[in-house]
Amino acid sequence: MRRTWLLALLAPVLLGQAAPKPTLVPDVSQRDIRIAYSFTGADLLLFGAIVYPDGRRPAAGSTPPEIVVVVKGPTQSVLVREKEKVAGIWVNADRMRYRSAPSFYAIASSRPIGKLVDQRTRDIYELGIDNLQLSPASGAAPDIQRRFDTGLVDLRKRGGLYYEAPSAVEITDGVLYRARLNIPARVPVGRYTAETFLIRDGRVLAAAVRPIEIRKSGFERFVARSAEHYSLVYGLVVVALSVLLGWGAGAIWRRF
């Protein structure tokens, strides 16, 4: 009898642990973005569906699902220099190197991220610009570290490479979702990821990733590949073209 009562008490807990969780089926409007001479940026549509176990949506009155979408560019080593005014001239002062700072970071959510999850969860999943793990290469004092972190983030915000779009995700009937994020013209090339998180009651229930490739095309691709694979020849050609254009400009000036 005692064992029966114990099983009866534990049954809801065991069933709750074994209950299947919803999954995400995400996609993006462009998985291959090509940068040509006329590239002025891209409008990226991220959309998908929430698939519930047995096809049953949450009951009316229950906590609605929330969606967070993060588009992140390839990490890169970055050297941040701090300028200082000396005798009326701006000169380089302190500097700090970061081993793996994201080259691009954009986050969109159905509500402001601070209202969806706690600080610990934001740190774990890097949800929000203030929660990025920038990986400095030196062990500077905390106040100096914060100063350089703020400077790096501010530079990338002004360049449109870091930004947040709260309340930009639309969810229809608790199943379908969509969001639009802008890819600026100055975005670096490389392999990007579009991460989608399903959140409810302050917990991340599901996550899914889709890759995005951004690369140069046409003449820009030819120049970039030449500089990377044939650096000596590329440098000689650039110098020769500079001399030729300079000579041509001088000849025209003397004629007129």
Image: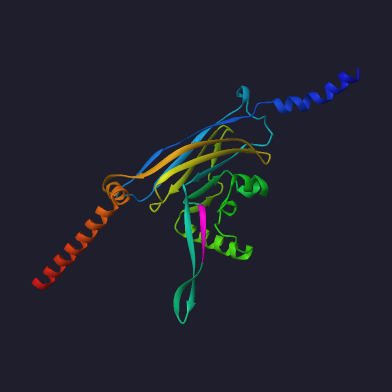
Q: Is residue 9 visible?
A: yes
Quadrant of the drawing holding the N terminus: top right
User: Is 96 covered by the magenta stretch?
Assistant: yes
Q: Is residue 256 visible?
A: no
Picture quarter containing residue 171? top right
Picture quarter containing residue 242? bottom left
- Give the magenta-colored segment's residue range: 95-100
Observer-nearest of 223 and 206: 223
Q: Main secondary structure of the magenta part?
A: strand
Colour scheme of the picture: rainbow
Count of labels shown? 0
47 relative to 119, above or below? above
165 relative to 203, above or below? below
Observer-nearest of 201 and 93: 93
Percent of width and height locating residue 217: 30, 44
The answer to whether residue 8 is left or right of residue 155 is right
User: Is 247 covered by the magenta stretch?
Assistant: no
Residue lying furthest front in this view?
232
Q: Residue at x 23, y 61 (%)?
A: 239
Percent of width and height locating residue 231: 29, 53
Percent of width and height locating residue 192: 45, 43
Percent of width and height locating residue 91: 45, 74
Residue lying furthest bottom in this view?
87
9 relative to 156, above or below? above
62 relative to 3, above or below? below
Quadrant of the drawing holding the C terminus: bottom left
The answer to whether residue 53 is left or right of residue 102 is right
Q: Residue at x 47, y 54 (%)?
A: 77
Observer-nearest of 72 and 143: 143
Observer-nearest of 213 and 199: 213
Q: Residue at x 31, y 50 (%)?
A: 224
Residue lying furthest left in this view?
255
